[in-house]
Structure formats: structure tokens, C-alpha cells
Amino acid sequence: MTELREGQSFGTMLDGMKKLLSILGWGVVALLGAAAVGMIAVRRGEPINALWLVVAATCCYALGYRFYSKFISVKILALDGLRATPAERLENGRDFLVTNKWVVFGHHFAAIAGPGPLVGPVLAMQFGYLPGTMWVLAGAVFAGCVQDFVILLFSVRRDGKSLTEMAKAEIGRVGGFVAYLAVIAILIILLGVVALIVVNALKSSPWGTFTIVMTMPIALLMGVFLRRIRPGKVLEVSALGFVLVLVAIWGGQYVSQNAALARAFTFSAPTLAILIMIYGFAASALPVWLLLAPRDYLSTFVKLGTIALLAVGIVLLHPTLHMPALTRFVDGTGPIFAGKIFPFAFITIACGAISGFHALISSGTTPKLIARETETRMVGYGAMMCESAVAVMAIIAACVMQPGIYFAINSPAAIVGQAPAAAAATISSWGFPVTAADMQALAHAVGEQTLYNRTGGAPAFAVGMAHIFSHSLGGERLMALWYHFAIMFEALFILTILDAGTRVARFMVQDALGHVYKPLGRTSWYPSILATSALIVAAWGYFLWQGVKDPLGGINSLWPLFGIANQLLATVALCVATTIIIKMHRAKYAAVTLVPLAWLVAVTFTASWHKMFDSDPHMGFLAQARALATGPVTRATSQLIFNNRLDAAVTGALVVMVALVLVESARQWWGILRGTKIVPVKESPFVRTRLVEEQG
Amino acid sequence: MKRIVTSWRVFMAALREIFDEAAYSRFLSRGGVASSSAAYAAFRREFEEAKMRRPKCC
């Protein structure tokens, strides 16, 4: 008895020690995080080291995961490890499959990581590193990770239902319909804008274009290998493809140095736009598995490898950030896109802080693989934290450049001037010194003819990445190779998004048209495939063409439009989440989704208002249309006026649709909270898991 | 050492899942067939439509 008591007191003492150590450990993390965030926030006038951003991000994510996601798991969602998930109950060896949590985590991260967290933060650096960094950290911890986590869990509890299905079931028909339209709209705008990024990265760049063209025969070769020689050995074949791509990048320098070859691979922006549209149509309409599937694998291989390599490079080099904490463009007069920090920093950076698109992945493949409810925290919250870390790396890559160089690359010719000397003088007059000779030397170092007016974010990111890689792995002489590696990496996975996105949108349109006329819904009926593919490509192709022809470079109009569409989809996702939380009788904790929802409504609705009605022609679509109508008339004037009016109409339509969802949701909440409406939670019934007993 | 081996296994399993090698293995074991050019072609046919409907994030 005495021994037992002694044993118990020893155990209690041990628990107490553990608790004390834990409190001390987390206290140190909190202090370190606070110091790093403080350093980023208050330091002015002197460059800071990138490691401060790395430390701040690591501590914020660690604290957010340990405490905030735990609070959500316990107090709101009441994650139940004994409740069987659809992967267990509906296991069919294909879509529904019990999978190791780390495997699901990797799968989910690979699906959510795209060009958004790389491009958005680079563009937002026109305000300086402070606003973007703070938004990425706070946005991810309190909004983006929460959205991904709760939507994943709610989908798991509803047999893996999609966001549109959940919106229809929980909010009503309007919610479902708007979610469907919002998904189509965001896909079309996304595809148009990412295609524009590729065009701006590859125009007049024989080296870059050659490398991307070479990925096609490489993918075909991989396809033949996969089919005939090593069936199913995708990793092995992707590694082989990667080596061949490296050879193509190395070979690209000889193409750019040979006059005849360089001419053959030099395309103007309109020509590249047309080629990309043809590619998108072919990828959607033709059975080109042999090209697309291996390229998809190759792109994933390069993407995951490069992100890991960039993280290592940043830690090894721990570069100094030359961009100031805040630039003069916080007043809204920025050359890359017009608008003040609020609301434009928050729609320019979507992926990396919060992205509505993630809700589609969290309610797509991932919920069908989750083995236990408790794993949704790590997969949903954790994977978004990693995506946010990618955004921090992009911020560092953009800020290691001298600000003058950053603005010279990202500013359109219509603002800074066409001639190198004029552009350099304009940018220097803003307080960011740069000379035409600096830009020429940089262009020479990366193997390009010019780096002026390369709007879109991708070339600036590539220069930053090449700087980090060449200074930490390989030295200055490899700068050109690293730059083209970065361009290839971005263009390759953007093209993959383009073909996958066109097909997904095509399927969605076919599903809808099938209700009108049955054969149109058949995914094997060629007239329907051709018509719907042409429709989708024409839709995003129009936005691409508009961007290519826009005198302000296209990004000024299209990236905010994409940001608004993406954040509006997040608004729909958070409406669904809040409605479910209230139905679960957890209204007192509804602020967890309601606060990010209110923030997104404020951001997106204000941004939409400015984009539609602001009197500054650089900002407001309608003001620009009016300015064009009263200015000198050229052949393109009427088209430019129409484009601006169209952009205003699209923005307005998106806002009205989301406002409808908000009103519908608010009616539901009001009814439930007043007790006039009894709405049951539409979850699948509880079934006890067998996995616990099997494990023993 | 055991932890490193386990971590490596999980890492490789994640890669096999991301790159559809695991899905192909399941396809083979479900049909009780050995890996071959024909089996891989059949797997792609079955798998492609589902895969094509998956969105890729921005």
C-alpha cells in the first residue's frame, strides 16, 4: 500500500515536471516568436536578415498548431477518434481508402501547393515586406488553416461531400448554386491569370521557351517508359525525366546564343498566348495521356524538390532583405497594382494566408483518405501551415533583390517608360536607385536580353530564387542556370494547372448541361467534349488575351480580380463552416470562423467596390473605361473599354452572388439562434471504428 | 535508428501515393494480376477519369 502511494506520488511528480517543462518550452517559443515578430514590425531604415522571418514564421505556426488548432479540435469540433471515417466505412480501394496520416498529409500538401503562394507574395512586396509577412502569418494561423481544417472535418463527417454539396445541404439551394458558379468563375479567372504569368515569363526568352518546349518530348519519352519499359514505376521515371529537364536547361544557353535557334524560340506575348490556348484546348479535348500524365508527375517532382531546396537554400544563405519594411506605395500609387494596403495586400496574397480554392481540395480527395477524425487537424491545419511557409520563402526571394531591380522587373512599360534609361530614371526617382547598366548586367547574368517590364511575379521570383541558389549552392556562374530552372519550375506547374483546370471546368459544365440535354453530360461524347472544352478555353483565353493586350500589363487588372474571386470562395466556405458550427450548438465558439469571415467580407467587398467604382483610372475598371472613352482613340480603344466594363461586371456579379449566400446563411443562423428554426446537423450517422480494435 | 527507418518508409509511402504508384499496386492486387504493359494501360483507363476531375490548387 505504501509502495503504491509512493509510486503514485512519483508519477504525479513526474507529470508535474513534464507539465512545467512543457510550459517553459512553449514560453520560450512564444518569447522567441514575439521577439522575431517585433523585430520585423519595428525595424526601420536598416535591412534585416531573412532568418528573422523564418524564426517568426516557425514560432507562429508552432504556437498556432499546438494551442489554437487544439482548442478548435476540443471545444468546437470534438474530434472523435472512435468514429469511423468514410475511408473506413466506404472503403473501395479506389476513392475511399484508409491511408497513413503522413501519406495523406503529403498528398494534400502536393494538391494545395501551386503558384499562388509564390506569385501573390512577390507582387505584394510593392508595399514592403511588413504588410505581406504579417498577413501571411496571421492569415494562415487564424483563417486559412482554420478553413482548411474545419472544411476537411465537416466533409469527413458527410461521407466526403464536396463544398458545393455541403453548401446546398447546409445553407440551401442558393448556397449550392452560388458555390457552383463561384468555382467555375474562379477557375476561369485563375486559368487566365496563370496563363498570363507564363506568357510574361517566356516572352522574348528563347532559353525559357526552349526548356518548356523540351518538356514535351521528355514527357512523351517518360510516357513510353511508363507504358512499355517500367510499367507503373512513376518515381523512377520522374527522376529520369528530371535529369533530362536539367539537361534541357543546360542546353538552353546554347539555343539562346545561336542566332538562328534563338530566333526560332523567340515569341511575342500574343503568339505565346495563342499557343497556350491551343495547348489548353488540346489537353482538355484530346486523349493525350502519354503527354499530360507524365508531365503532371514531372511537375510534381520538380515542385516538391524545388520547395525543399529553396528552404535549405534560405537557411544556408540566410540572406539580407534589401526591401524596406514599408515602401512609399502604401498610399495606393504602386506601379505593379493600384490600391492601398487595405484591402489590396489581403487579396493579392490569397494562397499562403487563406485561399478559397483549398476548400475544394479539403472537400475533394483528402476526406476520402483520412483514417481517423483526429488526423484532420494535422492534415488540414498542418498542410496549410506548410503552404504558408512557402509564401514566406517567396517573400524572402522577392526581398533579397535591391528594390530598384524588383520594381524594374515588375513595373509595366506604360508606367515606367519603354526605354531602359527612362525606366531606370523613373524608378530611381521613387527612391529606389537602379541604373540601366545594373539591369543590363543582371539580364546578362541570367541569360536574358532584358528583364524590364516582366510583370506577373514569376521572373522576379526566379531572379530572387536564382540569387539564393547561386549564392548558397554553386556560385555566381550558375546564376543563369538557376534562373531558368526557376522559370521552368514555375511555367511547368502552371501549365499543369492549366490543363487540369480546363478539364475540371469542362466536367463541371458538362455535368450541368447534362440536366438540360442528357448527351451533353456524357464525358465520352465527342461533340460535347469539343464544345465544352472550346467554351472553357474561350472564357479563360479571353482574360489571357485581355491581359496580353492591356497597356498596364494585365496583372494590375487580373490579379486583383483573381484574388477577389478566390477570397469570395473562401467566404462561401466560411459561411458553410459557420452554419454547421451553429447547428452543432457551438454558437459561442462561432467566432473562430465568423471573425475570418467578417474580415474577408470587409476585404473583398471593399476591394470589389474600388475595382468597380474608384475614380482613379489605374484602379477602377469603370473609371478606366471612361478615361479611355475621353482620351485619344486608337484601334484598340473600343476593345479596352469593353474589357474594363466586362471586368467590372464580373466583379459585381461575384459580389452579388456571395452577398446572397451571406444573407441566406445569416437567415439560417438567426432562425437557429432564436429557436424559430430547428435544423438538424446533416452528418453521417455515428459508426464505431474497427481500426482501434484491430490495432489492439 | 528504428525511427529513421520508419520515417523513411512513411516518406516513400507518401511519394508512392502522390505519384500514383500505390494506386497502381492496389489495382494489381485487387485484380490479382502481375504488373505489365497491358495492366498499366488498364489501370490508366480506370484511373484517368477520376484523376481528371480533381482540381489542382492555385
Image (cartoon, grey):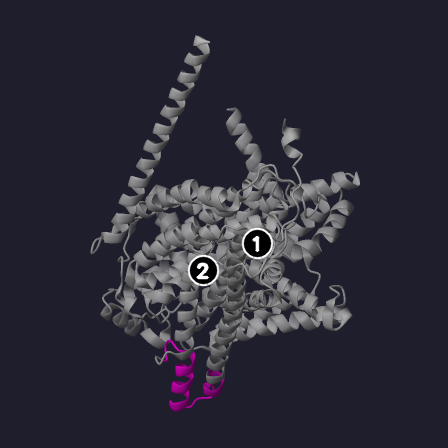
Residue A495 visible in rendering:
yes
Q: Which residues are magenta?
A: A617-640
Query: Does A356 lie within the magenta span?
Result: no
Could you tell which of marks 2 and 1 lies nearer the N-terminus?
1
| Depth order, front residue of A156/A484 | A156
Label 2 close to label 1 by CB (< 8 Å): no
Taking the image as shown, residue A188 lies to the left or right of residue A306, namely right
- Give the amino acid type for the residue marked by disc 2 in the picture: Leu
When the figure is inspected, residue B31 is found, relative to residue A265, above or below; the finding is above
Q: Which mark is residue A597?
A: 2
10 Å crowding of disc 2: few (<14), some (14-19), many (20+)? many
Could you say whether the residue bearing mark 1 is in a helix, strand or loop? helix
Locate residue A599, reporting x and y percent: 40, 61
Write the residue at 40% across / 21% down.
A12
Instruction: Provide the chain ID for the residue under circle 2.
Output: A
Residue A527's x, y, as percent? 74, 72
Q: From mark 2 to mark 1, how far is it between C-alphas?
A: 19 Å
Q: Chain of mark 1?
A: A
Is A682 displayed left or right of A344 in the figure? right
Is residue A457 shown to the viewer in this render? Answer: no
Q: Is residue A622 magenta?
A: yes
- Numbered badge on residue A361: 1
Q: Secondary structure at mark 2?
A: helix
Residue at the image point whose x is 60% and y is 51% from the top: A155
Q: What percent of the width, then of the height, locates residue A567?
A: 47, 63
Quarter of the figure that contains the C terminus of chain A: top right
Q: Is residue A426 above or below residue B8?
A: below
Counting from the top left corner in percent of width and height, residue A44 is at 21, 55
Q: Are the numbered discs 2 and 1 placed on the same chain, yes or no? A: yes
